[in-house]
Structure formats: C-alpha cells, structure tokens
Amino acid sequence: MDAETMVMPLILIMLFFPFCTSVDTLTPDQSIKDGQSLISNKNNFALGFFSPGNSSYRYLGIWFVKVAKQTIVWVANRNDPIIDSSGVLSINPYGNLVLHDSSNRLLWSTNVSLQGTTSSVAQLQDSGNLVLVQGNNNKLIWQSFDHPTDTLLPSMRFGLNRITGLDRFLTSWKSQDDPGTGDYFFKMNPTGSPQVVLCKGSTLYWRSAPWPWATSSSSATVSSGFNYDYVNNEDEVSYAYSIDDPSIISRVVVGNSGLLQKLMWNDGDLQWKEFWSAPKYRCDNYRHCGAYGKCGSESTSFNRFECTCLPGYEPKSPKNWYHRDGSEGCVRKQSGLSMCGNGEGFVKVELLKGPESFNAVWMDKSMSSSECEQECLRNCSCTAFVSINIDGKGTSCLAWYGELNDISESSYERWELNVRVDATELATYTRKSNGFLGHKRQWAITIIFLMVTLFPVCLIGYICLMKKKRKTKVKGKLHNQSLYFTGAMDYLEGNELEENSRHPDLLIFDLSCIVAATDNFSPINKLGEGGFGSVFKGQLSNGQQVAVKRLSNISGQGIEEFKNEVMLIAKLQHRNLVKLFGCCIQGEEKMLIYEYMPNKSLDFFIFDHTRSSLLNWGKRYEIIIGITRGILYLHQDSRLRIIHRDLKTSNVLLDGEMNPKISDFGIARIFKGDQIQDKTTRVIGTYGYMSPEYAVFGKFSTKSDVFSFGVILLEIISGKKNNNSYQTHPSLTLIGHVWELWREDRALDIVDSSITESFVSHEVLRCIQIGLLCVQEDATERPTMLAILLMLSCETTIPSPKQPAFVFRRPTNDLGSVTEKGFYSINDVTITMFEAR
C-alpha cells in the first residue's frame, strides 16, 4: 500500500477518535451539537437538546430514556433559549461546561472558579446527575443535582448547606411550552424547626410538618418502598429519597399550576401516576383556620365546618365562623386569666400535622415528655410542645413560643400536640377525662365477668361439636377472619391428582393482609393485566415483596383455572418456574400470591426498541437455556408430566438477575403415566403460539409446548412478534419469514439489530435451526425438550428442518363471511373455539 492510500484512513481515524469514548462522557476535545446526546451507562437518562410542548425554541436538558413520553428533569438554559438548532455544548479551556449558539453567544455555563487552566470531564450518571470532575484526580467540581429546576429525583439532595450557602430548591416552569423560571418554588425553610414550603412569589400557601418529617411513631416511615435520608445539623439541613426497587421510575415535580406531585411511571398504560400531591384539600391551604384554629379531615368537613378551635380557645369572629370563614382564627376564652404560674397545664390534641415551626425551638434533644412539660411551664411564652421519638436519637422536645398556626388533622404525621391552657380549662378537660376513664373501667369489669362466666360453656360446646364433626382430609389452620381454608381445599380436591399430592404446602392469606400489602390495590402498584385479571405489586408485613394475581369477575378464566394453577405450581419446584407463596379465597375474591419479579416479563424487553439493547446475545442465550430447562422439568423431570398450553414471552418472567421463570399455569394439564396426547373441545391459548394440531383439532401434547417454545426462540433472536406482518409478504408470520430466509441461506438477516454487535454467528444459526425444528407442521417431527437441551448445550449434529406450520391471515380484500378476528391455517380449517388471552 503506497503512502497516499495510507494517509487518508489515518486522517479519518484522527478526526473521529474523540468520539470513540463512552457515550456518557464529554471530554475537552469533544462537543455535543443539536441532534447528539449523552446516554448514561445503564440507559436511564439522556442529555441533549429538546423543544418543549409547541415551542420551536431549543434547550439543553436531561430526560428519562425508558419513559415513552419525553419527560424533562433538568434544563440548563431555561431562561435563555436557542432560537435555532445551532446549540453546542463543550468544555472551555478553563474547565467549565459552556453552551453557545451559532453567534458564539454564551447562553449557559457551570461558572466554576478554577485556578488556572485545568482539564475536566463531564459525565451523565445513571441517577440523572450531570457531573463535572477534574480529569487528573476525579475531584467533583460541579453537579446538576446542586442546581435543580422543577424536578427532584431519587438520591438528589434537597435543602440548604449552612456552610457554603448552597440552597437546592425547585422552581416551576412558566408553562408547558416554556421551561423558564415560573412563579412557584418549593424549598427548605430552616427557621425554627426546619420545614419545606411551597410558595407563589413571596406568598406561602403550603408547608410540610416540622422536622423530623418521618419518625418512629409516624406512619410515613412505611411508604411503599420509599426510603428517606434526613440531615439536620450545624452544617446542613436537607433530605433525599430513594426507592428499594430500581425498576421503579419516580420523580417529585412542581407544576406550573403550583401543584407539588410525587409521580411514578406506569408502563402498563404509559402514563405518570400520582403517588402523592399537595395542596390537595382545603386543609392543605396555609393558615386556612387562622391562629389557634385546627382544620379537620376532608371526611368530616363535608358535613360540618372544617375549622375548630384548640382547647381553651374560641372563634375570634363568631359571625365569620358561622359563615364558614375561619381565616381570622381563635382567641383565648379567658383572656384575663394569667397562664403564668397560675395553675395552668397542658391538654393533648392528637393526630395532627404540627403547627408551623418558624417560632419553634428544640430543647435538650434527650429530654423525656415529663421533663419537656416542666421546661415549657417554666417559660410563660411557651404555648405548646411535642415530645417526639426521633429514629436513632431517642426522645426529643420541640416547643412553640407565640401563636400556633396552620394546624390540621393528619393520618400521616400523627403528632400529639400538648397545648397550654389556663387552670379553668385544664380542670374542665380533667373532669371529662376522669369521667371517660370511669366508664372504661365499668365496661372492663363487665366484659371480664362475662368472659369468666361464659368460657366454660363455650369450651364444652366446642368439644362436643368437634366430636361430631367428621375427619377432614385437609389439615390446615382455620383463621378467625373468614379465610375459608376448608372451602379452599374443597376447591382443590376436585383436581385429579394422586392422593399424596392432593394438598399443596402453601399459605392461605387473609384478604386484609393482601389489601394492606398492595395499598388497597392502588393503581400505582399495578404491574399489568392478563386473561386472569390484574397483577399488583405488594409488600408483606415481613418485608417480602410479592406479586398478587387477582381474578377478575369478568375474566374468561374462573374457578377451574384458579384451582388448577394452585394445585400444579404449588407442587412444582424449579429455579426456572415462578414460585407460588400462597392464595387468598375470601368471598368473591380469589387471588394467587407469587414471588415478585422486578424485571417484569421477557416481552417487556425484546419487543421494545430501547429496552431490547439491555439484552445482549449472551444474556438472551442464557434465557433460552433457562426456558428450556424449565419446560424440560415440566415434561420429564418433575413427578408429574405437565403440559403448559400457554407458553409465550409474556409468561416468561425475569428476576433481578434476568433469570427466566415460567409462569401462568391456569390452563396447564397433567398427563397420567404413559399418556402422550389429549384432546379438548375448548381451545384456549394465544394466537401465534398455538400449534396447528391444537388450534384446529384441540389435540395437545408435549409437542404442543415444543411448538410454542420454537416461536419464543425465534422471537428472542429476532425481537419481533410471530404475528407481525412483513412488507414483502404481508400474509407471512415470523415463522414463514424465517423459513424463507433459511431456504435462501440468509437466516442471520432476522437477528435483532440491537444485538448485531454481540451475537455469535454459529450459535444464532444453531438456535434458528432448532427453532424451525420446533415449529414443524408434523408434531412427530418436532424434537423433545431433552433433545433441544442437548442440541443447545453440545455441538451435536442437528437435522435439517422441514416445512413449518405457516399461519396466514385472510387477504384484507377478501373477507367474505369471516369476522374481523377470523384466522385460518393453511388447510383452511377455521378456528371456531379460540379464546384470546
């Protein structure tokens, strides 16, 4: 090769070498232009240019990659838009990130003061944080988390650094089309006891309870997998939140309407779901009931005025109070009676969001409740106190001096506020309390007397009843909350299993337990929907995460499928089968409780253009092997021979390490002894995965599952669904398309583009050949799962596949009398009893 031909490739290599670094990193010799972007290592976030809403202006921002609806979480030049697509982000000679337009106008900069010329590198982290570090020692110079816009992300600290003065707070966009600084801001107020406030301009209109925002006595500590890290010391007052499940996408945002929301992304309906928001109710409005007033819950305010006065106080303006205006608040009943060393005391008011704490002071943080009370009594300006058990720090005392404002009932904070009252009011409340306790003592004596009297009678009756009752075949615990354990076993005994396998070893859950675990089947916890009904994520009281499969009243499946699944999967134990913890049968409710699979199902990844890149060929091959082993266990290695009948990618779940686990045994069948085939008049399954002999004639066997496995195998390789159509032959399914490419020796053309750089050619060709063997039209020609495992694991000779069972759609111009959902196979026999799932 002469010198001239060598120079050109070298020049090209030198020109493009700067772009060969990691896609999440920007170095001093690189730049990002409009149309280019940084992508974080795990494909969580992207940094690039965007236009919000209907605007044509361009902004530099960060957004979620795995969220179908583009959601911006940070904007650099929010108040300085680019009028065209000429924006360029780079690192200047002084080590700062800078944003320029075509006129070389500086629109934004990190603006960090550095000594002399320094080399720095910018990186977009998987948390959504854009960081700038010194190249030689990786010292953090600047980060976007310290300069938020309208969004708070997990692990992002929110609040004030008392040393440096850095204040991290949120400000709303001006509108959906303009990310400029809006009217609303959400920030930490460190005065008194810290609290976070939501303001419009200088007007405060919502605030949180005073710090600590979650305590050991607060229900907020159990928050559906959310964890909070609070800091309040001489150096800093801030907090950050995190989520146990990394697959959950969450954000806190201040909207341009002034609504503060915690949102979670729901992949099921591709929407952001509200987990929490404020201000939401009348009682959320700042000082809604004025000084010394208390705002009641929404459940009571519908029937009566929501404002009441604290003990010892009465409405300042009875007339306005009558007209349901409590903004003027309350005043002391006995204004002339001193509350300083004159027999005063405290009355406890429970279940409160604590008063605004601008005038509150923390006393000794190791003070008991009685010590706190005495300390408050010594100071005539002390109007109230709370004794709080702060996690890891013991009992502490917070006292208020001056007016008590913005108090409301709350089911979350549950503060017990001790309000200072005069001697007259204290005596009134003491009499009421003693009277109430007297009634309680009388009731207690009566109940004890009845228990002592009736217990022997009840015991004798119970013994007699147990003697008459016939011995049941099912031995289980009968719960006292209508668990209907015996009824559940009656359901299960109808299954035709041998005697010693009739009663599975599984738990029977109480409905109240499942309701609590799923937060009353909250839409936030909904994982998806299928032919059975809806599936919800839950967390049991012991911390165990579960998936709750709830039978729908309108489901095509019913009791038979339910008990079939309970009986089968409870007795099957394999690493590639989903584990069933138990069931719940109560009233009309029928539910199955499974182990939770954090990575959802296989189809969630392979059929999505973005997520499919997370499964390289090596991982896909491991998944194929795992599915093979799971089906082999069902067909041969378990004590029972199980025909699944509904194998498909959505019924292959993935655990935290992306290991496959087969699920959904609602329509599975058991074969006895040497039985190899059965027939049904009720064909149930999923179009595209059913073998022709099952779809047309209702005949099923282990070879029916082999056919379904073959379809799954081809889908994993191609990233396409079997019932997709193709431009060259719209009537062809994936099977037909692969078969044509195989005959033309172009089978590798079907490989998913997202794994073209990672796949091993001979392994993929071997898998395609096995897949075609599995979908052959003649069931007897298909290999067994044992043979498939050997072919996948060993370099054995594989026979050539014969023509597969093509499945066509009718041409759109020749519908005839066939309905819109009509499908037929190559022998023109219509499937008349197909039930979609």
Image (cartoon, helix red, strand yellow):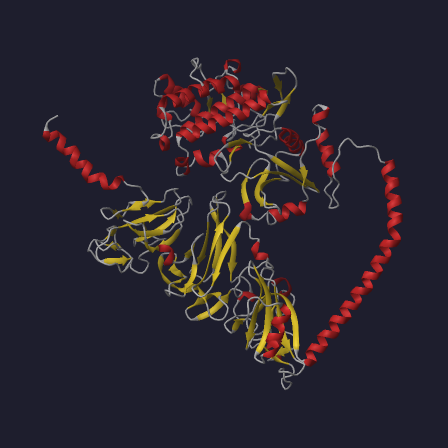
Q: Report the quarter where the N terminus lies.
A: top left
Q: Quadrant of residue 183?
A: bottom left
Residue 721, image x, y percentages: 45, 30
| 827 sits to left or right of 542 | left
Q: Quadrant of residue 754?
A: top left
Q: Residue furthest bottom?
A: 336
Residue 564, image x, y percentages: 65, 30
| 252 sits to left or right of 396 | left
The answer to whether one can see residue 826 in this image is: no
The answer to whether one can see residue 65 in this image is: yes
Number of marks present in the image shown? 0
Residue toward you, 766 or 289 = 766
Residue 245, image x, y percentages: 50, 45
Residue 483, image x, y percentages: 72, 42
**Residue drawn at (65%, 74%), measured in percent from left and top?**
346
**Residue drawn at (43%, 57%), measured in percent from left and top?**
157
| 37 sits to left or right of 234 | left
Residue toward you, 656 or 770 = 656
Using the image, determine if residue 288 lies above or below residue 795.
below
Residue toward you, 10 or 699 = 10
Q: Report the quarter where the C terminus lies.
A: top right
